[in-house]
């Protein structure tokens, strides 16, 4: 539950190495990523995340597969002879209306080819029916395909049930090879001929082997290699990925095959695809979720079930004893004659009727003495477990330790899932359509190359698990009120104070300065300031500004011919302009190059004769 709470309350951010240049684009990309994960994938994550976390905590190791899912659908578009005539005119081609209406039907074969070019899924027979309909009514329905589903997909995977890898692997991204098992229907497999480029010969042969699985499957009969469950109409695929040298450079290759038919009729290997992996991020599309480990290899991970086995057995032993005593109370043993034993064993119970010629022959032995030892032992074991796993405030557990444990748990979970977020974003940059991007962000989709996709953004996911405690939330609100006086002291002092209250708050303060709205406000304010300089009035220098953005805006202003001309001809204008540029340069030097000085240049560097007043916070 704490793992799920950490995920659903996480703050996911996309961070670019070029902060000032890509700040606005990064904010838009962050919005798209959050919508994709927390809205578009919400339904499947509600199902997959509990599975992945349960296997992680219980067994110690699980995986999350990060893929891209595409499913096509068939739609019918109305067409008419007038529409075809206008289309051919726009393309600069001869009008085909006369060919359609040709009574001799001499151009039918050519027209069928044209229709199939417009709709690649159109069979020849259906194309002739469309041609007949156009001749008779002037209208027809043209079948076209579109993507009904085009989104990322996260799937919980179990080691050596859904995914295989070398036993010595410690980092799944550095694994020599991985193999993922997948079950698909005939319709899904056939559709992948178009969507994923599967070999049609492989698909045809694989359909003949429906329900025939490899011996690696836990639901396979070892003698017949056929499925034992209801998956008899599905087809088993293995996605094998391995690093191979291509012109001396390691590249990730993918081969998809079916073990029951690994070779064709001619004895040659038969596979769906064998090529470089189509994902531009160049990584294995799996994220390892591991709870704890003694050694580096993934298989050394230890789950709670193994670690707390002794405690569980201690509790079970005492609980079994209490259950046995309850059974003794409700149905105590009977001592009777051998001849009556069989009859009484079948009739003794609640609301049963028992007969006896000699009632004194039936004796119930006294119950054994009872004390509080079992309950005391279970309470002791629970206290031991609470100290080992301090997820909640309990007797003998330090509340501060509970808060630290929860926070560390959130850091561990989100730290593992950061790569899943990052791979999702990289897949989105590769597969999102312009229409999807525009619908969510309202901006045109940027086009990235393979190298840009791999290095464009780093994704971070953070959460504050301490806010689950209402006392902690109340304390933070109180500290925020105490923080406000430090804002007048300048950026460095305020940032230091904000880091004491909450490190995320300091990050929010920096992000707020770089948000699209804040950046627009900064640029507009700088343009207004230069308007005042043009009127002969020196504007008040801003003390909490985004100094790098201000200098960048000044370069834009100075690049205008009329401004540069006045700068060269008007000495007073040039002096005020140089003074303002020097102020922002000094601010950048103070905050980045001289942080050890401990001052924020609250005095005006261009007018040392009249120092600015010192605030109370500065004086303290």
Image (cartoon, rainbow, N blue to C red):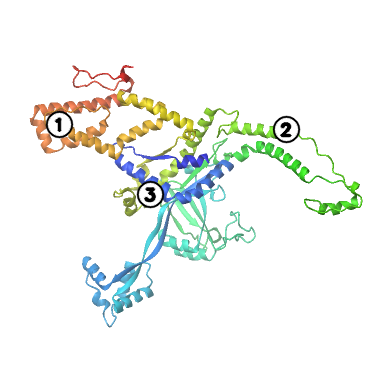
* Rendering coords of residue 420 (x, y %): 44, 44
Q: Which badge, 2 or 1, is on the more N-terminal residue?
A: 2
Residue located farthest toward the left when viewing the structure as drawn = 569
Count neighbours of disc 1 (C-alpha within 10 A) and say few if under 14, some if 14 to 19, many if 20 or more.
some
In this rendered view, identify the residue nearer to me: 413 or 357: 357
- The answer to whether residue 196 is above or below residue 363 is below
In this rendered view, identify the residue nearer to me: 430 or 223: 430
Name the secondary structure under disc 1: helix
Tell us which disc is closer to us: 2 or 1.
2
Which residue corresponds to the image point at 60% horizontal and 29% vertical from the top-left?
395
Give the left or right position of residue 198, taking residue 358 as reference.
Answer: left
Give the left or right position of residue 372, taking residue 197 as reference.
Answer: right
* Rendering coords of residue 60 (x, y %): 57, 41
Give the left or right position of residue 220, taking residue 325 as reference.
Answer: left
Which residue corresponds to the image point at 37% horizontal and 52% vertical from the top-left?
431
Count neighbours of disc 3 (C-alpha within 10 A) and say few if under 14, some if 14 to 19, many if 20 or more.
many
Tell us which disc is closer to us: 3 or 1.
1
Count neighbours of disc 2 (C-alpha within 10 A) and say few if under 14, some if 14 to 19, many if 20 or more.
few
Residue at which label 1 appears = 532
Q: Quadrant of residue 546?
A: top left
Residue at which label 3 appears = 428
Tags 3 and 1 touching, CB below 8 Å = no
The alpha-carbon separation of the residues under discs 2 and 1 comes to 85 Å
In this rendered view, identify the residue nearer to me: 67 or 619: 619
* Rendering coords of residue 4 (x, y %): 50, 42
Give the left or right position of residue 344, taking residue 239 as reference.
Answer: right
Q: Quadrant of residue 147?
A: bottom left
Name the secondary structure under disc 3: helix
For residue 373, which numbered disc appears in the image? 2
């Amino acid at each position: 539950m704490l793992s799920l709470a950490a995920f659903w309350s996480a703050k996911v951010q996309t961070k670019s190495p070029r902060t000032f240049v890509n700040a606005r684009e990064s904010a838009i990309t962050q919005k798209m990523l959050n919508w994709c994960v927390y809205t578009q994938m919400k339904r499947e994550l509600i199902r997959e995340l509990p599975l992945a976390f349960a296997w992680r905590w219980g067994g110690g190791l699980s995986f999350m597969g990060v893929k891209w899912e595409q499913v096509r659908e068939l739609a019918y578009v109305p067409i008419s002879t007038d529409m075809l005539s206008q289309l051919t005119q726009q393309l600069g081609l001869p009008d085909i209306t006369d060919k359609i209406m040709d009574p001799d039907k001499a151009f039918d074969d050519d027209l069928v080819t044209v229709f199939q070019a417009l709709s690649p899924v159109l069979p020849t027979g259906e194309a002739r029916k469309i041609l007949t309909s156009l001749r008779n009514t002037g209208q027809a329905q043209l079948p076209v395909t579109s993507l009904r589903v085009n989104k990322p997909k996260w799937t919980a995977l179990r080691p050596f049930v859904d995914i295989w890898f070398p036993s010595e692997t410690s980092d799944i991204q550095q694994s020599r090879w991985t193999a993922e098992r997948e079950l698909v229907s005939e319709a899904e497999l056939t559709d992948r001929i178009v969507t994923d480029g599967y070999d049609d010969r492989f698909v045809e042969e694989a359909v003949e082997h429906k329900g025939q699985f490899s011996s690696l499957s836990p639901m396979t009969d070892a003698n017949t290699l056929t499925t034992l469950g209801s998956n008899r109409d599905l087809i088993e695929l293995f996605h094998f990925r391995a690093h191979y040298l291509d012109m001396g450079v390691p590249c990730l290759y993918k081969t998809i095959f079916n073990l029951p038919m690994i070779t064709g009729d001619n004895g040659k290997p038969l596979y769906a695809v064998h090529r470089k992996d189509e994902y531009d991020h160049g990584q294995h599309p799996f994220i390892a979720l591991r709870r704890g480990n003694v050694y580096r290899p993934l298989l050394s991970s230890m789950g709670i079930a193994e670690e707390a086995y002794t405690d569980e057995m201690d509790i079970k032993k005492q609980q079994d004893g209490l259950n046995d005593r309850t059974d003794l109370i409700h149905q105590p043993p009977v001592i009777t004659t051998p001849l009556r034993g069989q009859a009484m064993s079948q009739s003794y119970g609640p609301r049963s009727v028992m007969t006896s010629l000699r009632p004194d022959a039936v004796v119930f032995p006294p119950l054994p003495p009872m004390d509080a030892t079992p309950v005391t032992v279970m309470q002791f074991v629970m206290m031991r477990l609470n100290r080992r796993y301090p997820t909640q405030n309990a007797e003998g557990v330090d509340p501060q330790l509970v808060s630290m444990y929860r926070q560390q748990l959130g850091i561990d979970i989100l730290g593992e899932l950061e790569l899943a977020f990052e791979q999702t974003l990289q897949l989105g940059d590769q597969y999102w359509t312009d229409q999807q991007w525009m619908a969510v962000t309202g901006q045109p989709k940027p086009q990235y190359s393979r190298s840009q996709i791999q290095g464009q953004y780093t994704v971070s996911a953070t959460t504050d698990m301490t806010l689950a405690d209402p006392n902690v939330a109340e304390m933070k609100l109180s500290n925020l009120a105490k923080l406000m006086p430090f804002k007048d002291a300048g950026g460095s002092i305020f940032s230091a104070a904000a880091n004491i209250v909450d490190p995320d708050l300091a990050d929010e303060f920096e992000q707020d300065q770089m948000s699209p709205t804040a950046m627009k406000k900064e640029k507009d304010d700088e343009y207004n300031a230069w308007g005042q300089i043009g009127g002969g009035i020196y504007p008040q220098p801003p003390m909490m500004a985004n100094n790098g953005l201000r200098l960048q805006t000044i370069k834009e202003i100075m690049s205008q011919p009329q401004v540069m001309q006045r700068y060269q001809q008007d000495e007073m204008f040039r002096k005020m302009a140089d003074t303002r540029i020097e102020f922002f340069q000094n601010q950048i030097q103070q905050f980045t190059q001289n942080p050890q000085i401990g001052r924020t240049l609250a005095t005006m560097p261009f007018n040392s004769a009249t120092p600015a007043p010192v605030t109370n916070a500065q004086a303290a």
